[in-house]
Each structure stands twice: as structure tokens, then as C-alpha cells.
Image: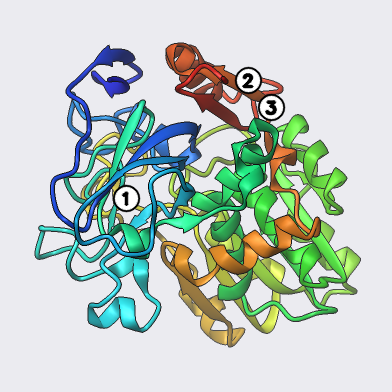
Amino acid sequence: MKAVVYDGPRNVNVKDVPDARIERPTDALVKITTTNICGSDLHMYEGRTDFEPGRIFGHENLGEVVAVGDAVDKVRVGDMVVLPFNISCGFCENCERGLTAFCLNTNPDPRMAGAAYGFADMGPYNGGQAELLRVPYADFNCLVLPEDARDKERQRDYVMLADIFPTGWHATRLACLNPGETVVIYGSGPVGLMACHSAMIQGASKVWQVDCHPDRLALAERAGAIPINFEQTNPIDKIMEDTGGKGADRGCECVGYQATDAQGSEHPNITLNNLVNSVKFAGTIGVVGVFVRQDPKHPDPLYKQHDGEVAFDFGEFWIRGQTMGTGQCNVKNYNRQLLALIVAGRARPSFVVSHELSLEQAPTGYEHFDKREQGWTKVVMHPDGGR
């Protein structure tokens, strides 16, 4: 099969690799028809993680089931399915509590909980930027889609259920957003835009979106947010001005450890500290941006040398009596209800899509998306060439 293979920093290639196959009776084999490039893929693409050369990228995947193991009971050959980026067993202590991002059985590393397709430190599983994908614990991990999922136009919405739509929703739930409340979202990449979309669906009275990329801020404004370009305006001052000095009720961090200041220099703590000062006393912050244990290439010496530590304004956070929720999204907690919103026409997460490419165009897609070039907001690929 053809697959997108990581060959080193900023070097991915489409290669012929051994076909994915059924390895255990609980597996399914899925022919991938739509797969996305995710912002978190870029950490690996840039060589900022320990992702091994030779592995296959891709954790946002949708396709048709073409084979099932003998122990698969519910999922059928021919079903169109979307796969949570979390690979989870469904029966461990954490999965039983809904914490599928922290499955205790799918990652062989005893220091880790949770696994994912084609992701650094998240188990040995290959990704789905390929023609075929092995899906472990298929009955639990496959979300069977309506019949219209065979339509490529509909797949643009449904594939967002693999990661970014549930993750954006998760940011608002970690922040404990209630109807009628205000929320500030730092980051206007695909996850930040999904957090905005989620907040609007949940009845937020006002959303501010902080970023520096005009094309992404334009999409945020289209989704109903008040855009703030931090290269032109101090976001804390703007939010305080708009709230009479109170601050936003809730805040979402959708950037992660490669956050930058107005001059373009990386500061892993900048969005966290800006959120503390943007959110009201006793407010709540949800953090879904990726933070890793180690980044040997980070310019911040604290983050580089001390296992991902950041200079966090804990005193201000404590004085303000704020609460913070963090961590990867437990996609299974949300994907079925979010599917219902898409089917009902209440959600259209595909508004972030800017480019649809064939799998062979993956190197070009990665290059442009990594540079945050104007107009490259979300890249969708079709291993079957869009047929």
C-alpha cells in the first residue's frame, strides 16, 4: 500500500510499504478514503519529538471497513467509519470511566497511558495517511457513519470527528463553559476554530479569538468570534476593555508549547500566562494545546533542559482562584453526539478546510501547512484520489 512515511525533519515521502492487515481477532481493516494533516503532526514533522523515521503519519482517519477479525461483533464489512485518534480498549479502568485518551492497555510503555495512530510516544501503531489502516478493538473504536458518508463532501465534516471537532469541544468542557458566558480562545488553528464553533453551539454570549494569522482570524470571525491579532493589539487589554475590567468567564488554550510572541519568538508559557490574566477571578481554563515532556530543540532553556517545565504565573493563578483542566481529548465521550449535530445541520466543522489533496501530494501539503502560508488552514487528503 502507499503511505506517508516520516524520513526525518521536514522530510515526508509517499512510499510503498507492507499492507496493513488483521493482526488480532478484535481488529478491523479500513480502506482510508479521507485523512487529515493535523497541527500536532507538525511537531513531529519538524523533528521536535522522538517520532522514529520510517513510521507512518496520520491520526485523523475515515474510511470503509474491508475486513474484520473473527471476534468483531458489531462492525461490518462495508460500513463507513470514522476513527477516534485515541486507540482504546474499552474495558480498562480508565476506559470504563470515559477516559479513553488514557487507556491502560493499548500503550506498551509502562510510563504512559493512552495510544494513538502515528503519534510520538503514543504506542507502536501506524497512522492512517495510507491506503489501509489496522484498527484495534474495532467494535469500540469504530464510529459507524450514516450512508451519506460515502459522499466526499460529507466526509469533509465527518472526518473532523476523529480529532479536531471533539478536541475543540473538549476545550470548552474543560473550561466549564455555560450558556450565556463569555470565553477567550488563544489559537485560531483548526482546534481553536473548532473550540469557537463548539462555544457558539453551546450558547456562549461572546467569544474572543486570539491569533496572528489573518486568514485564520477571518475564519474565526465568520464563525462568530471577535478576532484579536496579538501582533497589533494586546489581547489582555482588549478583553479587559470589552468586559469592564472583569475578564472573560472562561478561557481555552489551543496553541501548545510552540506558542510565539508578537515578534515570532517561541515561549511555551505565553498563552498560559495570558489566559490567567484574561480570565476573571474564579474563572476556568481548558488546555488542549500539546505540551510535551521534552523538546531538545526548544529555544526556552527551562522547557528544553527540565522536562517541559514552564515559567507559569502560579501566584497570579492562585490569587485569582482559577481552575485549569488539561489533557488530550477523550474522543469517545463526544463523537457520537457531535455526529448527531452534523447530521442535524447544527454543526459544519468542514468550514476550516482549505485544501483537498491526493495522498501523493502529502509532501507539498505538509510543506505549506507547516509554514502557515496564507490560506492553508486545514488540509484533507484522499488516498483513493478522491474517487
Q: Is residue 181 above or below residue 108?
A: below
Q: CA distance from mark 2 to mark 3?
A: 11 Å
The residue that label 3 is drawn on is: 354
Q: Is residue 328 above or below residue 348?
A: below
> Can I make out residue 219 in this image?
yes
Mark 2 or mark 3, which has the lower sequence index?
3
CA neighbours of label 1 inside 10 A, class few (<14), some (14 to 19), many (20+): many
Q: CA distance from mark 1 to mark 2?
A: 27 Å
Q: Residue at x 48, y 58 (%)?
A: 143
Q: Residue at x 56, y 29 (%)?
A: 380
The residue that label 2 is drawn on is: 373
Q: In this rendered view, identify the residue nearer to me: 224 or 281.
A: 224
CA neighbours of label 2 inside 10 A, class few (<14), some (14 to 19), many (20+): few
Amino acid type assigned to the residue bearing label 3 in the image: Ser
Task: Specify whether 269 is left or right of 5.
Answer: right
Q: In this rendered view, identify the residue nearer to me: 103 or 369.
A: 103
Amino acid type assigned to the residue bearing label 2 in the image: Glu
Instruction: Label 3, secondary structure: give it.
Output: loop
Amino acid type assigned to the residue bearing label 1 in the image: Tyr
Please tell me the numbered disc located at residue 303: 1
Task: Specify whether 26 is left or right of 62.
Answer: left
Instruction: Label 2, secondary structure: give it.
Output: loop
Tags 3 and 1 in contact by the CB under 8 Å rule? no
Mark 1 or mark 2, which has the lower sequence index?
1
